[in-house]
Image (spheres, helix red, strand yellow):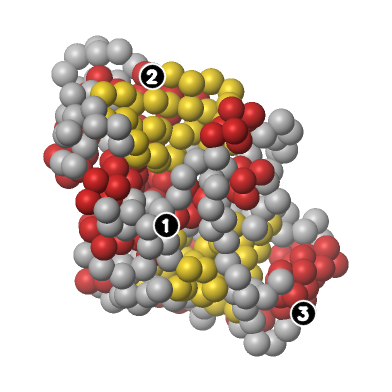
Amino acid sequence: MKITKLICQILRIPHVEHKTASSQDSVLVRVQTDNGLEGIGEADSSPEMVKAAIDAPFSHNIACGLRQLLVGENPLETDRLWQKMYRATMYCGRRSVMITAMAAIDMALWDLKGKHFGEPIHRLLGGSFHSRIKAYASILFGADGARTRAIAEKWRANGYQAVKFGWEPMGQNENLDVELVAAARQGLGDEATLLIDAGCVWDARTALQRANRFADYRIGWLEEPLQPDDVEGYRWLRDRSPVPIAAGEEECGRQAFADLINRRALDVYQVDLSRNGFTESAYIRQRVEEIGARLCNHCYTSPVTVAASLHWLTTCRDAFLFEDCVEDSPLRNELTTEKVQAKDGWITVPDRPGLGVSLDEEFVRRFLIVSSE
């Protein structure tokens, strides 16, 4: 079996808002083979940047576009192909956009591998510990406490036993920060799990002050209180915080996670499959489990990444929560023919070959912006 085509497609909804929500556009990678199989993958990144990383022509041996590295290769050799891509993009890659493009390709290769062997990806990764996982509704804060409370009440009424609020307008001042968290707790009631995503807004000392204030509302974790590169700040904060500290969603590849893991800087490591792919995420899982920390997925895109995240997270022995984006976006809800969403607060792991989802081709045609192969 050989790769014959690598297609890159950008989809975008008609009205993109200025908010921190990556379910408004998508870059899909479709890897096709000479025996008629196709694997699909997705990157949570700037779609046009990912497309450029894939489409770029050969410059020299360590500055090369990804497509020409893969055509003619055997798609089952996922580890070797990751290393080939990493080596051939050393001058223009190693972090960020290039790794997200590689992650989308890697996801598609594992989808192909599962279809070739007739097995779900989680079985090829070594086996599933869970048939379903408790899901938390992942949503943005309201503009103030009253609107945040209403959002909490809505998702609690929809059956979620856990809800995470994130990003804007947190970080403007202490009173508003506490108002938002207090209102979220009121809306959820005493028994539900409340998670708070600060959106990288404070220095370490301010974050510790907020963690102490938020502890009164029994939050399950405080996510991304610091800038992503402040590893020493995270280590300092984690050692002093009364609530668990979570982060990692921006990280792309094992090298990006290395300092966070080696310094035991977090309580919960959040891995995004659309920025890491299966090959790197499997390695990251092993490292995090070695240090006794917890793992969770990050996912705010389409059902393609939701399915990938489920396949990976179910191989994590101590998986305890799944991030379920509940943005009301067509890309989140309609890109695949299968619905991959929580029901009564629990989400079921796909058990069909590969990712276990298929694209709705009419939807793709309707929202397609550009395609290259």
Alpha carbon separation for disc pair 1 and 3: 30 Å
Q: Camera-side residue: 80 or 49? A: 80
Q: Which residue is mark 1?
A: 309
Q: Which mark is residue 373?
A: 2
Q: Which residue is found at the position 72% from the left and 59% from the top? A: 141
Task: Label 2, secondary structure: give it.
Answer: loop
Q: Which mark is residue 186?
A: 3
Kindly identify the amino acid type of the residue bearing the numbered disc 3. Gln
Residue 326 seen anywhere in this rendered image of the structure: yes
Q: Camera-side residue: 47 or 338? A: 338
Alpha carbon separation for disc pair 2 and 3: 51 Å
Q: Which residue is found at the position 40% from the left and 73% from the top? A: 131
Left or right side of 371 for 14: right
Earlier residue among tags 2 and 1:
1
Compared with residue 270, is residue 76 higher up or lower down, i.e. above or below?
above
Earlier residue among tags 1 and 3:
3
Task: Label 1, secondary structure: give it.
Answer: helix
Q: Position of residue 146 (x, y in %)?
A: 85, 67
